Image: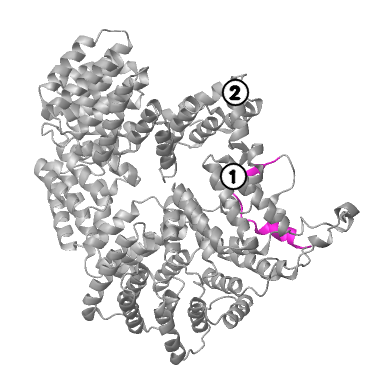
Amino acid sequence: MASGRCSEERRAKAIIDGKVVTRVPPSELHLEALQCHFTWGLSSNHVTLLQLRDKLLDICPDESNPWRGHIYNLLGFLQTRLGHADEALSHFSAASEALRGPELLVNYSDLAWLHYERGEHDRSQEYLRRVEELSREYPTERDRPTEGDHPTEGDQPTEGDHPTEGDRPTARDRPTERDRSTETKRDHSLERDRPTLTERDHSTDPSEYPLLPEVLAEKAWTLMNFDPQKLVAAELFERALEEQPERVEWRSSQAIALMSAHKHRPTGVPPEALLKVQRAHEEDPGNMYLSAEYLSQRVKRGEQVEEEEVAALMPRIIERAHSSYSGLKPALLYYRQTKALDVAIVWAEEALEKHPDSRYVKCCAALCYKWRIRFQKDKPSKRHLVEKGVALLEEMFLLYPYPALVKEIDLADLYGTYDRAKAGEMYQKLLQRRLEPHETQMLYNRYAKHLQHDLSDIPRCLEYHRKAALIDHDSFFKDNSVKAIESFKKRGRDSIQAEIQQSPLSAHLEALQCHFTWELKRSRELLFSIRDRLQDLLPDESNPWRGHIYNLLGFLQTRLGCSDEALSLFSSASEALRGPALLVNYSDLAWFHYERGEPVLSQDYLQRVEELSREYPTERDQLLPEVYAEKAWTQMEVWRNNDLAARLFQKALEEEDERVEWCSAHVLASFYARNKSSDLLEQLRHASERDPENLLLRAEYLELCARSGQEVVPEAEALAAKVLQRPDRMHRHMKPLLELYHRAVSVQAAVDLAAKALDKRPDSRFLKACLAMCYTWRIQRGPASQELIKSTAALLQEVISLYPDSCFKMEIDLANVYSQYNHSLADAKLLYSELLRRDLEPTSKQILYNSYAKFLYFQMNDLYTSTQYHMMAAEIPVKSYCRSNSIKTLQKIKTRRVCDPRLRAQVNDFLLRTPKI
């Protein structure tokens, strides 16, 4: 049975007492107990993994690097999580060659996991056997015999069994004997919390086992590469050093972890950690990275460092500057601390000359130029420095396809010194990005400084400092924003008001009614989707909302960081609109030029807004009907807030009830707000008769008629003939017409209509997407020929290439089409795997989990894992069809007697705790 197969071969997540618990089948018990990258709970964020991969590649490890094998191990793990199994195997194999003795324990454990995840269970079992052999050869305290476990006479080794001198493990290969009586408690407290708990048949927790020092050291070194784990890494190194205090590289790495964990502490590492740093520096004088970091610690403590000492160190660093382990970056940071940035630039240029092809050296040089520009106030001589810094940073983005957020902010700040429009565009693009809380906090802090120093916008500067301070994450940036707010308070209200008066634009702008003040913030993913949908509507010059489409597109492009395109669209809106309808457009342009750092142009549009407001006055606290209507239409497009849109349209119609397009939009908004209730049938009929060109309105009316049993096919066909006669209007009318055909005529008729439309406009990406949608309906309806499935897959691939920024739902359709095509199940699994690794917004995650759950059940015969994904979809607190569908499926599973009773109990428990939305 499917559930039996799943319980034996797959893990599944249950929810017990509010925590995710993993039920582990017997075949995975050994794997879960291993100590390796796959069980250490490392970050799985896709961008984080890509950035860490680049960081490791910059080390450029040679055979003298004591961490060479560990670098290969971590690279192998990263490649598995990035979906590159072959590259991962290559890295793990390189690690196997670089490591010796007990150091291979983590490597073999990683390989056991890799082969298991690839479905190569025999190979996985082979590496599990090797792990077991190594564990016997290098036992920990738990594995060693106790006093009562003396071997019997038959178990005594013979003379030939005793190791010779040459056979004995060296200090590098074997841990020393020592009392571990206190280590079990410490193991339990230091093991990093995993994202899931493991329910096992036995009560012993593997995190309580004592570990070999080599394993502790590799785990420590690995956690060093994940920022929040620096202090945990330092403590793990401490435990490893208790066993093997002679391991210099462990002590040096512990010192580096301690200094990194306290890098924002003005006085350096705490006194208790300073002794460890000093000892590491004394024992490892050849470690230039450690030496350079130690220089900064001495400066923080107020110690005078002789220039000759630094000058003697720098040539050695420059010689190996291409490696991030060379110490180049901490050495340059030392010069920043001592305010000798011109000297830092000299050394950076020398490193560039020595290593012209090193992306790491270019990154360090760009950092130097950024410091020099931002921290030294000599503007007349800065321009050439800015140009060099910008050039280096832009080249760095080509060399690092997934740059750290801080580098993107650095580039925006450099532009802020001479091109405020470009800086504003870059910051707006960053502010629209979905970020982790600590990243958002850093961005708000840096943006606040940009607003203060580059734009003199004190009100918004304070606003973003407050936003940064309110994020529940302790960091340098939070503390810095808190201090900035306190500094403004100390200067007194009069001082702040004086600065605010120097930038009066912001107060006037906040009072405007336009896209910039309507709280239209959406995820970047959704902004692209809305943009592409609106762009498809533009060819139709008869569209009564054409000017509003241009306005909204202009706003979307500002938030997507495309400033020039935004200006062009706002200008098109200015040409399409007339009279009071220009009020929102001029307000948008005032905001647009303000954000570009063009206050004169912004003031000019504010003046135009004021003139229009005098020409078309309203009562106090009331808006012009044109503004109500545009705001209502925008709410429908961006938020699908149909209830609010209906109320706003009602206000507009109270002033001008003869506006046909407003009446039609009001009826549609009310219809959607009431979930397409049949109570509105007469209103739809009346509105469609009044606005015969609005085929969306007519299509909704006919669909409602069909639901009540009325014959609508002849009129639907007449509408189709009318649309086909006007190819220029197809984009506005085709999709609602096809949906009417789908529900009220037939799927095949919808396919035929879409094909005819595409024949009229063969270059239209929108009509290609419509035909692909109809093909997908046809495949979903029932048995479809392999030829149709193949054609659908090819068309979907083309459409995805035409909508590169908004193709998420099409990719899910493609995965499901692959699953229907002979020999393409692997392609479906691969595409789903890629989608599951993406950082998606909640609604998209819900759609993905629901679709993947169906794929697992119907195509993979995997009820158990399918159920887990239905629960994951239902757990997301977004009201949608997908959530309702997953809950409905779970309710059926709960009552199916053929299911595993444990699965039914798990589902029942989940449903009891899942709130209704």
| Rendered image quadrant of residue 667 | top left
Across and down, in percent, residue 248 comes to 61, 75
SS of the residue under disc 2: loop
Which residue is more in the foreground, 33 or 527? 33
Residue at point 48%, 49% (across, down):
80
Residue 781 shows in the view = yes
Which residue is more in the foreground, 838 or 448? 838
Q: Residues within 10 Å of mark 1 (few under 14, many from 20)?
A: many
SS of the residue under disc 1: helix
Q: What residue type is labelled 1?
A: Ser
Across and down, in percent, residue 405 comes to 38, 60
Which residue is more in the foreground, 690 or 74? 74
Q: What residue type is labelled 2?
A: Met
> Would residue 17 appear left or right of 427 to someone viewing this image?
right
| Residue occupied by mark 2 | 1
| Residue occupied by mark 1 | 124
Magenta range is 181-200
